[in-house]
Amino acid sequence: MIGVFALQGDVREHAHALTACGAVARPIRRPAELDDVDGLIIPGGESTTMSKLAIEFGLYDPIAKRLADGMPVYGSCAGMIMLASTVLDGRPDQRSFGAISMTVRRNAFGRQVDSFEAPVAVSGLSDEPYHAVFIRAPWVESVDPGVTVLGSITRTGADGTTAPHAVAVRQGAALATSFHPELTGDLRLHDLFVRMVRESR
Ligand code: GLN
């Protein structure tokens, strides 16, 4: 059974994708619901709100503990921000789990251009690039050794510079993407995550 952090974000889309991959999905709103899941997805949404609600609902510390114990986790967009060790352009009181030793920048691709779609080749999945949907997405500004960059995109950011930026990363049992595979019906990343959860059991 795989949990989906369900206090905020596109929970239903992730649950559908997990079900389509043959997994059982459980929305997580209370700490006790975490006890019998083998993995967790943190959806897209708004990371500042997720951080606030996770603390208010007493979920922050139990999730941090499970992640420290090695529970597999996948975060998309706001979920990626929640997994970072360092968040740039975040709110001062925003907290993140640090499951991946990386620095991410919120809203890095710009606010006006709220949304764009672009092909992203993700290593290890197959030659067909992902049709990636970016919605006020973060990028990965830097990673520590031990983090594998699975996919990058070259695009002009909110800072006006055009450079390649990592948008899909993995460190051990933690996976994160700047984009939203749960919105496009391409199940390869959820399938990879379900396999990571099965292998960890
Ligand atoms: N900009 C949002 C944040 O900072 C993320 C957007 C998303 O998840 N689509 O949390």
Image: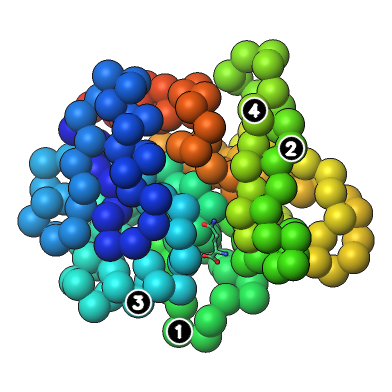
The N terminus - image quarter: top left
Residue appearing at x 65%, y 30% in the figure: 131
Task: Report the front residue among 46 and 35.
Answer: 46
Say which element carries label 3.
helix
Q: Which residue is mark 2?
A: 118
Residue 101 rendering spot, x and y as whole percentages = 55, 55
Side (left or right) of 165 relative to 55: right
Residue appearing at x 64%, y 37% in the figure: 132
Side (left or right) of 58 relative to 17: left
Kind of residue at badge 3: Lys
Q: Residues within 10 Å of mark 1 (few under 14, many from 20)?
A: few
Tag 1–tag 2 contact (CB < 8 Å): no
Q: Residue furthest top?
A: 127
Mark 3 or 4 closer to N-term?
3
Residue appearing at x 54%, y 52% in the figure: 77
Residue 60 rendering spot, x and y as whole percentages = 28, 67
Query: Mark number for residue 52?
Result: 3
Kind of residue at badge 1: Asp
Query: Mark number for residue 93?
Result: 1
